[in-house]
Amino acid sequence: MTLSVFRAIHTAVSPHSLIFRRSRASFCCSVNRPSSSSSAVSATPVSTVRIPLFLREATGTATISELHAWRKWAQTLVSSVGSKFEDADNGPGPELLCREIRWMLEDVVEANLDVVNRLSDETAFGKDGDVVRLRAGLDELYCLWEERIEKRRPFQYLVGCDHWRDLVVCVQEGVLIPRPETEMIVDMVEEVVSRDKRLAEGIWADLGTGSGALGIGIARILRNGGKVVATDISEVAISVASFNVNRYGLQDKIELRQGSWFEPLEDVKGKLSGLVSNPPYIPSMNIAGLQAEVGQHEPRLALDGGKDGLDYLLHLCENSALALESGGFFAFETNGGSQSKFIADVMTNRSNFSFRDVKIVADLSGIQRFVTGFRQ
């Protein structure tokens, strides 16, 4: 199992609860830093993206003994909360928090894993006066972990990235942290395009792209002629997605457009080979009861689906027929259960017979998570 997959499995339990990884102006960079001659990515708003810890230049130093002292202090904070987070809202327990300490060291220390392993082994320190280079200063490390425990700030926001599928994508406040179950949409698309060359070379849309993870995952499996148009109403999300698209060199395959749902897609109306979305689908009354990492820190804009959680899902249903070409594929993520059944019924029986082969697909936990189908 790769480190990325291991982190993904152990850092997100469900869309309602995350178990994760202080923003400072000195660690910001322009979203346009990765340059390209391509014009495929639309001009992004003037905004900044915080560089993830693992991508920063190592400008600080510390001794092994200083890092060991930080680790022991961080573990003491974990011990002080015990199972309080788990008992309160199904939050992270001590075992997972201790893993996060190691993961943070892996991102911060500019060295091979031998140094991190030495920090984790009480009996294998060797020369504790050895100096190692750091991508963040000790003061920042202390501040970050204090925020993790005292404010329950998501781990991904602390380190600035999320391990999703085979990607490591930049994330920050204002952008939803990608969930492991959403990876299944990429698998579904891969299966569909493997059977239909026309779909593999067509235009796909990712509505509400957030970090751009889903759009990037799909773009990497499309054939040379295929492309993705990814939209989001959030300026922060478009900036972060642009950074991620550029980092993976996909400027020629992904075009980012800021706007609400289908509004930026007028020029490709009726021409889409595929349409995917992980929209806000949590009922408004349930937001207050979410895990603290989610409800107190992730953007409500990306979570709140209205009274029944159906506002944006129904909007997708109502507009997909006009957006997709004949034979085009759609995949929507839902809250599961009765919500997915309702959406499947809408697409099957209340859409003037515009769709065929509509079905509900379970996620890896057995939750009836996705609704998929094809345009007639």
Image (spheres, helix red, strand yellow):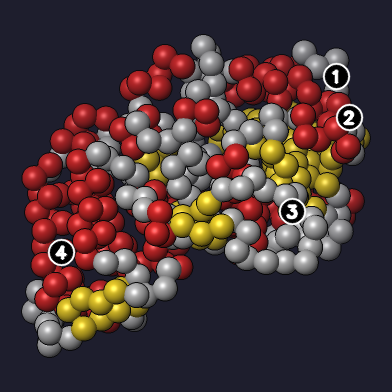
Between discs 4 and 1, the one toward the N terminus: 4
Mark 2 neighbour density, 10 Å: few (under 14) some (14–19) many (20 or more): some
Q: Which residue is mark 1?
A: 353
Mark 4 neighbour density, 10 Å: few (under 14) some (14–19) many (20 or more): some
Residue at coordinates 69% horizontally, 38% vertically from top-left? Answer: 258
Between discs 2 and 3, the one toward the N terminus: 3
Task: Assign a secondary structure to mark 3.
Answer: loop
Up-down relation of residue 57 to residue 216 (above or below): below
| Residue type beneath disc 2 | Gln
What separation in Å lies between label 4 and label 1 (alpha carbons)?
62 Å
Q: Is residue 107 left or right of residue 356?
A: left
What's the mark number on residue 70?
4
Between discs 4 and 3, the one toward the N terminus: 3
- Mark 4 or mark 1: which is in front? 4
Between 293 and 221, the one lying in front of the other is 293
Mark 1 neighbour density, 10 Å: few (under 14) some (14–19) many (20 or more): few
Between discs 2 and 1, the one toward the N terminus: 1
Mark 3 neighbour density, 10 Å: few (under 14) some (14–19) many (20 or more): many
Q: Is residue 263 left or right of residue 96?
A: right
Badges 2 and 1: C-beta atoms under 8 Å apart?
A: yes
Image quadrant assignment for residue 106: bottom left
- Mark 4 or mark 2: which is in front? 4
Residue at coordinates 41% horizontally, 60% vertically from top-left? Answer: 27
